[in-house]
Image: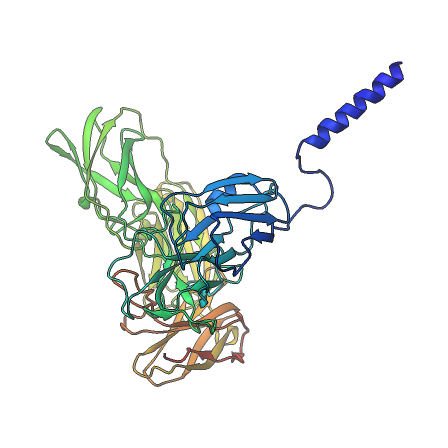
Amino acid sequence: MLLQRHKAWLALACLAACANPVAPTGGPPDRTPPALVESTPSRGATHVQDPEVRLVFSEAVEPASVTRALTITPALPQRPDIRVRGRIVTLRLPSPLRPNTTYVLTLDTNLRDLRGVSLKEPITLAFSTGPTINQGRIEGRVINAATGMPVANVDVYAYALGDTLPPTTLPAQPDYRTQTDPEGRFRFAYLSEQPYFVIALVDRNRNRRPDPDEAFAAPPFPALQADTAATPFARPWLLTARDTLPPTPQRAEALSNRRLRVRFSEPVRLLSPDPQNWYLFQNTTRIALQHVYQTAESSPEVYLETEPLTPGTHLLRIGSVADTVGNLAPNDTLRLLAVDRPDTLRLRFLGFVPSPEARLLSDQPFGLRFNAPPSSLAAAIHLTDEAGQARRFHLQTANGTTFWLVLDPPLQLGERLTLVLDGRVLGIADTLWQAVLVGLSESDLGSVSGLVISPDTTAPIVVELLPQTAGLPVRQVQLTPGDSLFRFEHVPEGRYRLRAFLDRNANQRWDGGQLIPYAPPEPLVWLAEPLQTRPRWEVAPADTLRFPPLP
């Protein structure tokens, strides 16, 4: 009897486990996204009148992801009723459906299965309530303008145009939406055959509108014709960011009776470390500031060193601060409470930049880093050549804690200098730190040459050699309109990316255009593969940097 009861309990446990849709454990991880295997109506169906759409997937899908992933064109007067039962998704659209209309349903890469595996590219289903279905198509590709690499899962929006002029404002919602695949490609299908304004957008808040802090790609041309040819557009959409929001001071606090900290909404940089640009008051008395500084090249925090403060309320007016792209912070006034806590911060030397044994180009910076502003730093530095003769220099700093050597004259090819930092002069310790600066010689350097071809012979071309090795500078060569040969001399060994752009506004930097009012991006091309340079060699890439033909 006991054995029979045990068997019955095992059978009930098995039935209970089988009734719960729990993902099986063990075995290789599931990396296969769900696939659409059946739909009612079917793709391309016509004369559809039933407002219910039934989608059958290869596996069960996560219910909440369906709502996030779904887009329906044309826009519906109200949200559809969505029911998810394992592999089956049922959509009830508001009825009646519009007559003679092509409906396009898109499920983007937010759709995932129960194990969290998402789509690699969007799924599109279209049907028509009339006898024909739209067949217009637009295809393109989105790449990162800074790296030349494809960008996946970027939203791409298409806005119908009445003519070939760009819109002066964007509608509340796009007419069509899709996303890029892992190769950066996107494809609109089932469009009405007319011109469209097509943009790419990293739509972080999912409001389907461009916001100032979101990366975007303006279209290469203001109007693209949807047709049945489905030929991918030759010029890629170049994803860039244009930050127009200024940093805002959020909080000021006293760390001690001589040191204050101000925090901003984003990383900032000092436009000048001069403390006279900042104003600190107690009542109507201005308090002298001794130093304004940052401890990192890109940080949301600024520190102020003051004369000893009396405990109580103080007012601090912000000085000259900008974010990393140049937006100025407002000169707001912050309230803070001074404390009588003694200041215990001691000056420390953090190291040489890039290293104590640096092989440098003449235009490559060399610096010294501290945790706080040092006094009499120039007097603590002894810089000599191989003959023991003093080498002239002065110091520059942007943040008050990293100081860069500016040599007069610049570091020569093959020159060897010795730098000694005397900690006693700075009051740090009875310690000497030493660095060796060696100017790279001709035998250490190579060159890069090549050909760039553009159908536009009116704009200058800028060719850039972008190092993938940390510490090496970006190199530029500017060609006059009509020239095609470029050459980079004195190139250190390393890996580089090569790109060129048409510098139509002659500011020597690539500009990504804008959406509204529309301005096209400057045409930009990348060499497909990185280059490896070697000493005493001239590298000539097999491929030509070639701009697409003009429309």
Q: Is residue 262 above or below residue 378?
A: above
Residue 407, horizontal then vertical, whole percent: 34, 64
Nearest to the observer: residue 295 or residue 233: 233
**Quadrant of residue 479 within the rendered picture:** bottom left
Q: Is residue 548 above or below residue 298?
A: below
Is residue 183 visible in this depiction of the protein?
yes
Q: Is residue 546 above or below residue 175?
A: below
The colour mode here is rainbow
Q: Quadrant of the N terminus?
A: top right
**Quadrant of residue 365 within the rendered picture:** bottom left
Q: Residue furthest bottom?
A: 482
Nearest to the observer: residue 390 or residue 270: 270
- Quick check: 424 left or right of 271? right
Residue 182, horizontal then vertical, whole percent: 53, 59
Q: Quadrant of the C terminus?
A: bottom left
Nearest to the observer: residue 340 or residue 548: 548
Q: Residue furthest top?
A: 1
Q: In this figure, what is the number of numbered marks?
A: 0
Is residue 438 visible in this depiction of the protein?
no
Residue 490, horizontal then vertical, whole percent: 45, 75
Q: Which residue is depicted at the point 73% across and 40% down?
A: 26
- Quick check: 271 left or right of 367? left
Residue 437, horizontal then vertical, whole percent: 45, 62
